[in-house]
Amino acid sequence: MALFLLLLQQPLSSSYALLSYITLLFLLSLQCKVATSAIILSFRHHHNQLHHQRPMIHANQTNCAMFLGTWVRDGTYPLYHSSNCPIIDPQFNCQMYGRPDSDYLKYRWRPLNCDLPRFNGVEFLLGMRGKTVMFVGDSLGRNQWQSLICMISTSVPQTQTQLVRGDPLSTFRFLDYGVTISFYRAPYLVEIDVVQGKRILSLEKLDGNGDAWRSADVLSFNTGHWWSHQGALQRWDYIELGGKYHQDMDRLAALEKGLKTWANWVDTNIDKTRTKVFFLGISPSHNNPSEWNTGATTKNCYGETEPISGTGTTYPGSYPDQMRVVNMVIREMNNPAYLLDITMLSAFRKDAHPSIYDGDLSPEQRANPEYSSDCSHWCIPGLPDTWNELFYTALFY
């Protein structure tokens, strides 16, 4: 009102000037309010995305859907040779133990709407200087652990290193950088103990294992395969749940209960502002050729030299029920782990398993691929290198 009275008292030319000034102030004020509202809406949208996005598909900072894509041939792969990485277990060292083909090493994962950054071992070490990365889980976690060490080592062949193997904990140190890459063997994540000579799988306990995990700066967990083992491969005699002992129970229900115990431990014990937590998706096996060849005459992955054809947006074969449990549990966490969702992209790689080129097999076993082929683990170099390229991207990009 005061500005309006002042305007009436001015000469006409001055009034026009003052009116223009007032109009400018109004427009500036309106623009600030619009900008502020846009920022608030942007924050709300980001908050909703964080709390409502499915953990099954993650995007990095460039909105790259990393886990949907296709396998493409790339002559610059593999990133290293097995002869230059002495840490590889015989179980995974396919080239050393006679695998005659090498085309399976020449594939690169290409997401639908981006390219992954090429792995840089020096950048990894500099970014993790003075820190510890720990893989926790079963032999698929060990697969990934050894792959990562090989990928880093080929970038810094002259650096001082130290390997200490143990059970359950093995460590590899890059001494010049103060970086430790560890593997902690815990195939169920929850506790398994011996009571009066019987192996007890306790679905609600994680005490002994968890104490060793707290100090890591990056934790990558996995589990899955051991929950479905039966007969001689089953590693427990009884399951303990709710103070009662069971000779058996629904395996998916057991996995869900065990994973919820793990998830509660992470939510309660891990400071997400200090420690990054990952969970490796269920690694698929290729024991059923009918999933990729309706007229299959082979019995498993033996002799397979090419990936399953197709684009990695539709799962080939039957989607693992275990993965549905993993998705549900992670989604319900207070501070969800980052799901490294390698399940579908790995499902196309029927060609990447050791099959009979496993250094732990006897000559007699290798002569019988129908029964002895390893179609669960992966050759190194090979598919686990892609898991680690995704791991590297999620950590640094």
Image: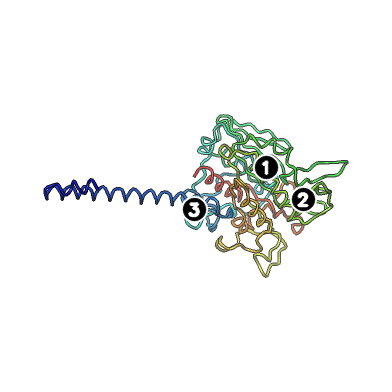
Q: How far apart, in angstroms, are the residues tagged by discs 2 and 3?
A: 46 Å
Determine contact: label 1, label 2, CB under 8 Å: no
Give the residue displayed 68% in from the left and 70% down from the top.
Answer: 295
Disc 1 element: helix
Disc 3 element: loop
Give the residue displayed 47% in from the left and 51% down from the top.
Answer: 44
| Amino acid beneath label 2 | Pro
From the image, tell me which residue sits under label 1: 265
Give the residue displayed 71% in from the left and 64% down from the top.
Answer: 298
Q: Position of residue 259 (x, y in %)?
A: 69, 49
Q: Residues within 10 Å of mark 3 (few under 14, many from 20)?
A: some
| Amino acid beneath label 1 | Trp
Q: Position of residue 39 (x, y in %)?
A: 41, 49
Q: Residues within 10 Å of mark 1 (few under 14, many from 20)?
A: some
State which tag comes first along the sequence, 2 or 3: 3
Q: Position of residue 344 (x, y in %)?
A: 60, 57
Q: Which numbered disc, 2 or 3, marks the residue closer to the eye?
A: 3
Q: How far apart, in angstroms, are the residues tagged by discs 1 and 2?
A: 44 Å
From the image, tell me which residue sits under label 3: 64
Between 8 and 107, the one nearer to me in the picture: 8
| Amino acid beneath label 3 | Cys
Disc 2 element: helix
State which tag comes first along the sequence, 1 or 3: 3
Q: Residue furthest right?
A: 196
From the image, tell me which residue sits under label 2: 363
Between 271 and 371, the one nearer to me in the picture: 271
Q: Residue furthest bottom?
A: 295
Q: Position of residue 142 (x, y in %)?
A: 67, 44
Q: Would residue 241 be found to the left or right of residue 31 on screen?
A: right
Q: Residues within 10 Å of mark 2 (few under 14, many from 20)?
A: few
Q: Would residue 370 be found to the left or right of residue 141 on screen?
A: right
